[in-house]
Image: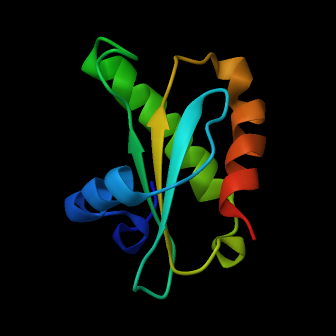
């Protein structure tokens, strides 16, 4: 899990989902918006339509947080909020593909 300074607040999530722009990839939508902080911040949203049980939603979130945690924090785009809205359920084998897609979005 990323440190608290790298996580978007509820207000930031609402602002990013309304005003943010970003790519629609195979597994998620990315909403990107500039922020006033020194570092980038992230949020992952998995709704009930994607995964019915809370256990399944938290599993997806943990996997994506681990992907973000393994990326070097120095390479993130500076002063940007990223909100990832998960589209569909993915298998454990898809993590490498997801990692490449996330890196394409968050790296400079």
Which residue is more in the foreground, 2 or 77?
Answer: 77
| Residue found at x 29% / y 64% | 12
Work out which residue is located at the far left of the displayed protein and give it: 11
Vertical comparison of 82 with 39: above or below: above
Which residue is more in the foreground, 22 or 64?
Answer: 22
| Residue 73 position by quadrant | bottom right
| Residue found at x 30% / y 11% | 52
Q: Which x, y percent locates residue 72?
A: 70, 68
Position of 5 with respect to 15 (left or right) is: right
Which residue is more in the foreground, 97 or 31?
Answer: 31
Q: How many marks?
A: 0
Q: Which x, y percent locates residue 103?
A: 73, 53
Position of 92 with respect to 18 (left or right) is: right
- Name the image quarter holding the C terminus: bottom right
- Name the image quarter holding the N terminus: bottom left
Vertical comparison of 88 with 19: above or below: above
Vertical comparison of 27 with 8: above or below: above
Vertical comparison of 4 with 44: above or below: below
Q: Which x, y percent locates residue 87?
A: 50, 25
| Residue found at x 34% / y 68% | 4
Question: How is colour applied across the structure in the image?
Answer: rainbow
Q: Which x, y percent locates residue 2?
A: 46, 61
């Amino acid at each position: 899990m990323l440190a608290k300074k790298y996580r978007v607040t509820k207000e930031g999530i609402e602002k990013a989902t309304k005003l943010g722009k970003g790519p629609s990839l195979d597994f998620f939508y990315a909403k990107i918006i500039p922020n006033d902080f020194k570092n980038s911040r992230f949020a992952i949203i998995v709704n009930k339509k994607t995964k019915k049980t809370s256990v399944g939603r938290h599993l997806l979130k943990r996997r994506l947080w681990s992907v973000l945690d393994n990326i070097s924090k120095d390479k993130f785009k500076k002063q940007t909020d990223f909100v990832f809205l998960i589209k569909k359920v993915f298998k454990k084998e898809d993590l490498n593909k997801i990692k490449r897609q996330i890196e394409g979005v968050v790296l400079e």
